Amino acid sequence: MARRHRLIRVSPSAVWDVLADGHRYAEWVVGTARSEPVRGQWPHKDAAIRFQVRLGPLRLENETVVRLCEEGVALELEAHAGVLGTARIAIELRPWGEHCLVIVDEHPLQGAGGRLHNVGFDALIQLRHRTMLARLARLCESRASDAPHLAPVPSAVPGVEGAGHA
């Protein structure tokens, strides 16, 4: 079982906003060239996204189905990858101060991936997760930095608004 975590420097709701946007799936999932919601309302239970994987000139269409959705907290997906089979991918969001600890847990269920599952396979999944979580963090954190700040920055000097921290 491949389990990895990353602290993302935004709120859990900001991370959820990215996870809940089915059109952005290909931006953070490693190996995915493009994606689009095809059934249901993503990320609700039984909704599906079709995604494309490119291997040189080959383009493979696959699908990911939501198996569990606890809004703002957890998302469990079943990824279908053709002859490779299916995998369970669980994403958990935990508040960590003002930030979000994202925990990803993935393991193959059926097909070649399930039959060939071993420690080496888990190591490859770990590498994939490292990149995937880095992409997710970059998306969430850049989105937060693009958002206008509505509240004044607290001052280090009493009575002076907006001075902030040095």
Image (tube, grey):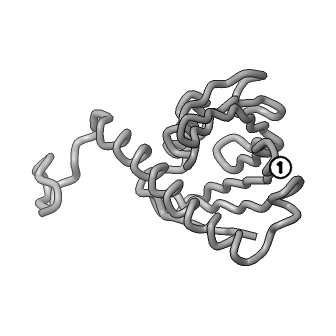
Q: Is residue 29 above or below residue 114?
A: above
Left or right: where does residue 3 sit relative to residue 96?
A: right
Identify the residue shown where x is 74% and y is 35%: 63
Q: Is residue 54 above or below residue 162?
A: above
Name the spot of residue 25 as percent of width and height, x first: 58, 37
Residue under label 1: 85
Position of the C terminus, as image quadrant, is bottom left
Identify the residue shown where x is 77% and y is 22%: 39
Q: Nearer the viewer, residue 98 or 78?
A: 78
Outermost front residue: 57
Q: Is residue 36 above or below residue 31?
A: above
Position of the N terminus, as image quadrant, is bottom right
Identify the residue shown where x is 69% and y is 29%: 50
Name the spot of residue 100 as percent of width and height, x first: 52, 57
Mark 1 secondary-structure assignment: loop
Left or right: where does residue 49 sit relative to residue 7?
A: right
Q: Residues within 10 Å of mark 1 (few under 14, many from 20)?
A: some
Outermost bottom residue: 119
